[in-house]
Structures are given as structure tokens and as C-alpha cells.
């Protein structure tokens, strides 16, 4: 669309009325890209072709758009103040249908009385003959009122916060007391002077100062005789212990060839020895004959 001053003035008036740029562009068939391009040209170039009026005051197009948006914000704030002052009214509805006001002067009359009096309805009508809807009044929100008062009067109605900062140091604090024991003064000990060791030239091969002048004659050195090792003294032999019966049996088995019959078991000294009960002659002897009336049990 071609740009002209009349179109720019219509856009500014529509923004101040509807509150949005999209609605103004849609109502006048202007794209959003063209609108913001005109705002950019107005801010860079300016001139008489971008001058419009808002509130009977001439100004550039981009400044007029900002002023129109501020007027919308002002209207929102004024409507909010009015709601906080008087509350809001809502049309009463029951099951989606509007509830209308009844005439309280006709509540005591029956339907037959209304028919006799020629009254066709019990509801009130306005000057145009339309039914008057029933309204429900809502008081303003207490939270909204407090929020508005805190923004307008922050010193009295604003949110008051008290911040306490407790700074604690974990360091060591020296506390002086008048009766505390006084520390003894520290005596400084002077360091001991180091003693330097004398330097001695050692000549291990020259012992003339100690042994005197020795003759230069060479004497043959006789090697010492070899030391023969002493003969080992034999330890006295322990007396041989007699073999037990079990050891003799094991030695006898090892001496035999494999496959031969085993040797008979070594007779133990207590095997076959009669016990004390077996020494009774009544058990070991021929015994006695049974009595005459004895019965043999088979």
C-alpha cells in the first residue's frame, strides 16, 4: 500500500483505540513489515511526510506510535483503578441463560390476578422495552488493592523486610585478664661458636716419625705351618631299643616277595586271655546234670 500522511494518522488513531499494532495494520490492510519500515524511516529521515498529530500535538510517526501505546497503558491503569474503587458487576446467568429482574411489586399477585389486570409479564423493562438483566456485584480484590497501594505509597503500604546479618569470626581472640599469670620472659641463648677442626696431612706409607729409621735389609718371611683340622669326636651311640610287635610285623611283610601268602597276624599279648568270669569252674568244667523235673526249651 502507498504511504501517505492520512494513512499514518489513521494507524496512530487505531493503535490508541485498540491498543495493538496488529489490529491497526489488519484494519487498514498494512503489513507488519511495511509498518516497521515506516517507523524506521521516520526515525532516520523524518520530515514533513512523517508528521502526524496525536492529542492535537504534531510529532513524527514513530514517536506518535510510542505515545499511542502509552495512552493504552494509561487506560488500562485507569480501568484497574476504577475496578479497585467500585468493584465489578457481572450479568447473572443460570444454566447458560440470562436471569432478568423481576418486578417486586407483582410478587404478591398470582398468575390469575396478573391476567385479570392485563399484565403479561413479571419482569422489568427499560425505556426501549427490553428486559433488564440481573447483575451480580463483586467487591474489589483485597490483594489487588494492597498491590496498588504498595506501588503508589511504598513507604507506608510497601512490603517491609528486615534483613539481619550476623557476622561471626572463627578466629582466636586474645582476652586479657588482670589476675591472669604473667608469662616468664624468654631468655635468648647465644649460639656456640663453631670450632674448626685442624687440618692434618696423613701419609700412611711414611712412619719414620713414629718408628724411627728402619734398616733397609730384607728378611725372608717364613710362612706359618698349616693347621690340621681336629678329628671329629664320635658321639656315643644310643642303646638300641627293642622293636615292638607291630614294627616286627611290618618288617616281616616288607621282606616277603609280592604274591606270597600273608604272614599270620602277630598274636597280641591280651588276645585269647580268659577274663575273670571265664575262670569260674562252673562255666569251664563239664557242668552238672539237670534236675529231675527240668523242662528243655528248644
Image (cartoon, grey):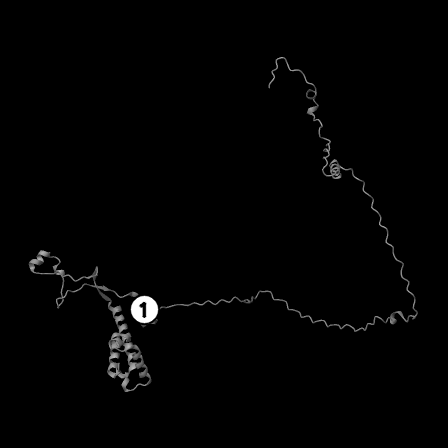
Against 244, residue 5 (above or below) is below
> In the image, what residue occupies the spot 12% across and 59% down?
106
User: For the view shown, which residue lies furthest in the front direction?
Assistant: 259
Against 31, residue 45 (above or below) is below
Answer whether residue 32 is visible to the viewer in this image: yes
Q: Quadrant of residue 93?
A: bottom left
Estimate how packed mark 1 is, as few (under 14), some (14 to 19) or many (20 or more) residues with alpha carbons within 10 Å. some
User: For the view shown, which residue lies furthest in the bottom direction?
Assistant: 48
User: For the view shown, which residue lies furthest in the top direction?
Assistant: 292
Which image quarter holds the N terminus?
bottom left
User: Foreground residue, 163 or 212?
Assistant: 212
Against 229, residue 240 (above or below) is above
Query: Left of 162 or right of it: where is 291?
Result: right
Query: Left of 240 or right of it: where is 9?
Result: left
Q: Quadrant of residue 179?
A: bottom right
Element carrying mark 1: helix
Q: Number of numbered discs present?
A: 1
User: Foreground residue, 221 or 248?
Assistant: 248
Against 47, residue 31 (above or below) is above
User: Residue tagged by mark 1?
Assistant: 147
Q: Quadrant of residue 31?
A: bottom left
Counting from the top left corner in percent of width and height, residue 215 is at 92, 70
Counting from the top left corner in percent of width and height, residue 135 is at 20, 64
User: Foreground residue, 229 or 77?
Assistant: 229
> In the image, what residue occupies the spot 32% across and 71% down?
151
> In the image, what residue occupies the spot 89% across and 69% down?
211
Counting from the top left corner in percent of width and height, residue 196 is at 76, 73
Query: Left of 259 or right of it: where is 158?
Result: left
Counting from the top left corner in percent of width and height, residue 107 is at 13, 58
Which image quarter holds the C terminus?
top right
Answer whether residue 55 is visible to the viewer in this image: no
Amino acid at each position: 500500500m502507498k504511504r501517505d500522511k492520512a494513512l499514518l494518522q489513521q494507524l496512530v488513531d487505531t493503535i490508541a483505540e485498540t491498543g495493538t499494532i496488529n489490529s491497526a495494520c489488519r484494519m487498514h490492510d498494512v503489513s507488519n513489515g511495511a509498518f516497521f519500515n515506516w517507523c524506521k524511516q521516520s526515525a532516520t529521515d523524518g520530515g514533513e511526510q512523517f508528521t502526524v498529530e496525536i492529542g492535537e500535538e504534531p510529532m513524527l510517526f514513530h514517536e506518535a506510535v510510542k505515545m499511542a501505546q502509552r495512552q493504552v497503558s494509561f487506560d488500562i491503569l485507569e480501568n484497574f483503578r476504577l475496578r479497585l474503587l467500585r468493584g465489578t458487576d457481572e450479568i447473572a446467568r443460570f444454566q447458560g441463560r440470562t436471569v432478568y429482574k423481576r418486578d417486586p411489586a407483582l410478587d404478591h399477585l398470582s398468575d390469575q390476578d396478573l391476567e385479570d389486570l392485563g399484565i403479561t409479564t413479571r419482569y422489568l423493562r427499560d425505556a426501549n422495552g427490553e428486559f433488564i438483566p440481573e447483575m451480580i456485584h463483586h467487591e474489589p480484590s483485597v490483594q489487588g488493592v494492597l498491590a496498588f497501594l504498595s506501588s503508589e505509597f511504598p513507604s507506608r503500604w510497601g512490603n517491609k523486610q528486615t534483613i539481619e546479618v550476623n557476622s561471626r569470626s572463627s578466629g582466636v581472640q586474645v582476652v586479657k585478664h588482670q589476675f591472669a599469670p604473667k608469662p616468664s620472659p624468654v631468655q635468648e641463648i647465644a649460639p656456640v661458636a663453631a670450632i674448626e677442626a685442624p687440618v692434618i696431612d696423613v701419609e700412611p706409607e711414611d712412619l719414620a716419625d713414629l718408628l724411627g729409621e728402619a734398616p733397609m735389609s730384607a728378611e725372608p718371611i717364613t710362612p706359618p705351618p698349616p693347621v690340621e683340622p681336629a678329628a671329629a669326636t664320635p658321639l656315643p651311640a644310643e642303646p638300641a631299643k627293642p622293636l615292638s610287635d607291630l614294627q616286627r610285623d611290618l618288617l616281616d611283610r616288607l621282606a616277603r616277595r609280592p604274591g606270597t601268602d600273608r604272614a599270620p597276624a602277630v598274636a597280641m599279648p591280651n588276645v585269647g586271655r580268659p577274663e575273670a568270669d571265664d575262670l569260674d569252674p562252673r562255666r569251664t568244667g563239664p557242668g552238672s546234670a539237670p534236675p529231675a523235673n527240668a523242662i528243655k526249651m528248644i
